[in-house]
Every structure is written in structure tokens, then in C-alpha cells.
Image: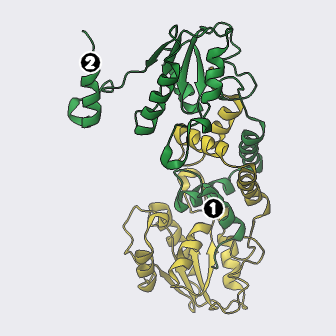
Chain colours: A green, B yellow
Amino acid sequence: MEGTSEILEQAIEQLAKLPGTGRKSARRIALYLLKQNEESVVKLADALVSLKQSITRCSSCGVISDGDPCSICSNVKRETGKICVVEESQDVFLIEKTNEFRGRYHVLGGVISPLDNIGPDDIRIKSLMHRINDEDESIDEIILALNPDSEGEATAYYINKLLKPYEEIEVTRIAYGIPMGTELEFIDEATLSRAFASRNTF
Amino acid sequence: MEGTSEILEQAIEQLAKLPGTGRKSARRIALYLLKQNEESVVKLADALVSLKQSITRCSSCGVISDGDPCSICSNVKRETGKICVVEESQDVFLIEKTNEFRGRYHVLGGVISPLDNIGPDDIRIKSLMHRINDEDESIDEIILALNPDSEGEATAYYINKLLKPYEEIEVTRIAYGIPMGTELEFIDEATLSRAFASRNTF
């Protein structure tokens, strides 16, 4: 089509692949970049490439990190003996923001999902067991912080079963229930039902 | 903060500067890119840089283009004598999509806006007059397709006044099927097409 530029269209096509970005917003972003100075566009491009090229994963917990081991695993001030098991690296970030947990993490990199052909060997369960068997870590609690969907539940169940023989290790999971500041009226039945089932003494 | 990566944070910071992208979507995009293969991330980065480095502007109409003159100005099949005056390059793209106009364009690169210290000399009005005085172009109609806001109105008024002495040139403007206070960018094709077809004498 006339009235456009092949280079512009290529940039739009690439941008439109990003999550949450349709062709219209991709076009807006491209035209915005055209108005910026070259330095800042190169800075953005470099940041994206080094994201892919320079970032690594902690060989212990599996979180995405600038170095190996990551800043959490290498921090001697973190509580030893407690591992919080999460699905993805961003979950570590979210939990760290709460300042509620001072132990270490283990990122599974996914969940067991037979429909997607993802079994226990496809996620980082073996390396979790390796850490549990490592006497230096002397684990006494595994906190499961997986998403409350059927795959998360299945994965939590599987890990809990694996840990049954380890009597010295307590397996816990984060509480699922009514989110703070919400009214019951707006809560779905599944959540309300779960909140009821796991009610605590006041 | 622990549990995150400096490289990741830098990419998020750069992405969050894009229009329509807050920190949350920037993080989602960054984590999405981390999961892609290196080739496709490099492809995106290259597209953004070449957007800035390789794109040029048509020295005649001012539209962003891969070459100079642009594909519209160099197309001998386009109707001569008619110039559609728009604010920005993307307006050319939008009008081309309607297939309603087969003449050529002139991109002002902005509008007169005294509050922002933008006067007639700061936008491409001189080059428009130059084209109008060019006998090769033999202009007989100038179609004003500016945004229907006060700056667009002022600019249309100014250009119309400049063209008063040219009795052989008809000054028209796209019809106000377009709701006032909206920008061309957000108009659906059908409305824009209608507005073109029913343009009136200024």
C-alpha cells in the first residue's frame, strides 16, 4: 500500500507480536519512536537484546538473574532451611515485594500439565529434590506458592507426595481465600468455597 | 531489591517509556521477550533501530518514507493537481486506507499553536506554497484534512487565507462527519471515507 514505509511496517509487525500490543498500539509506539532521538531508541534496542543475551538463571533456585548464584541464594542473611516453591521468576519478584518471606526460593519454570504434555521431569522438580537432599541447606519447610488453578493444584499435590518420606520437613502452602479489601459480593464461588474450607480459628 | 535482575529492570524501564505501556505491561513484555529465542528479540531490536536510522522523509510532501521521493509523489498514476494537507504522516496512511483520494499529500508536521510557540514558519507551510507556485504540479484543489480542534481550525484558516489570491485553486476540507474533539487516529475507516467523499468548499 502507498502512503506507508516498508521499514515502518516491519517495526509495527515486530511490535505487534508483543503481549498486549495490537497493530494500532504497535503503530503508535513506532511513530513515537520515530520522534525520539536516535540515542534513546538505540538504548531501548540494546536493553532488549542484553535482556536476552546477558541475563542468566540462578543454577540453584532457577530465578532469572544477572549473576549465578542469584542475589537471594548468595545472601547469607537470608533464612536457611525454608524454600518457597513458585512457578515463574516473576512470582519471586511479587513475593519479595511483600517483605513477608526471608527464606530462599525455587522456581519450577512451569507446572505439571498433562494436556500440554508437561510432566514432572519437564519442570525443575529434580533440582528441588536435590536441594532437599543437600545437607548444607538443611531444609525444614517447603512453602508451596503455586497458582490456584488445576495445574497448580496437581503440581502441589505431586510435590507434597514426593516429600511425604521426609518427616523433618513441613510442607505448607500460602493461604487461598478472599483478597483483602474486596467485598464478598464480588467474589467468585470457587474462592468463597475455598475460603470457607480453610477457615481459621479467630 | 532482591529477587530481580538489574538487566531486567533496565529493559522494563526502557519499555515503560513507550506510549500506552505502564510498568506492569513493560514487565510482562520483558518476561515475554526472555522466553523468545534470541533471533526474534534481535529482529525486534533491529527493526526499532532501523526505524530511526533508515527511514527518511519525502522532500516533496514530507511523509515518512523508505525513499525520497516517496512512493506516492513518484507515482505517475496519482492524480495531479490535488494536494491533501494533513498534520502528520500517519494521517496519510489512514487516508490511503480509505482509497477515496488519488491525489498527493502535504504533511505539515504539526499545526499552528501559539500556546506551544508553534507559528506558521515552524510547520511545512512554506514548502506547501512552493508546491502551489510550482507550475509542474498545476494545483487546482487543496483539501484540508486537519484535526477538528482549535489548532487544526486555526491552521486551516491560515492556509485558506494564504490561498485566497490563487483564484484557480479551490480550497476544500474534509466533511465534518468526524466528531469534534477527536483525532483522526481514532476514527473508523467508514467515517473517514465518508468525510472525504463529502468534502465542501472552504
Q: Is residue B43 left or right of residue B23?
A: right
Q: Give coordinates of residue B201: x percent, y percent.
A: 44, 85
Neighbour class for label 2 at 10 Å: few (<14), some, many (≥20)? few
| Element under disc 1 | helix
What's the mark number on residue B113? none
Q: CA distance from mark 2 to mark 1?
A: 51 Å
Frontmost residue, A128 versus A199: A128
| Element under disc 2 | loop
Residue A196 seen: yes
Which residue was labeled with disc 1? A12
Residue furthest front in the image: A165
Q: Residue at x 59, y 67 (%)?
A: B90
Q: Is residue A70 left or right of residue A29?
A: right
Q: Quadrant of the N terminus of chain A?
A: bottom right
Q: Is residue A131 above or below residue A21?
A: above
Q: Give coordinates of residue B91: x percent, y percent.
A: 56, 70
User: Which amino acid type corresponds to the residue marked 1 in the rendered image?
Assistant: Ile
Q: Quadrant of the C terminus of chain A?
A: top left
Q: Is residue B137 above or below residue A188?
A: below
> Which subunit holds the residue at mark 1?
A
The picture quadrant where one finds residue B126 is: bottom right
Q: Residue at x 38, y 65 (%)?
A: B180
Residue furthest left in the image: A185
Q: Earlier in the sequence, mark 2 or mark 1?
A: 1
Q: Give coordinates of residue B75: x percent, y percent.
A: 70, 87
> Which subunit holds the residue at mark 2?
A
Which residue was labeled with disc 2? A199
Q: Is residue A48 above or below residue B145?
A: above
User: Which amino acid type corresponds to the residue marked 2 in the rendered image?
Assistant: Arg
Q: Is residue B183 left or right of residue A201?
A: right
Q: Give coordinates of residue B4: x percent, y percent.
A: 63, 26
The picture quadrant where one finds residue B9 is: top right
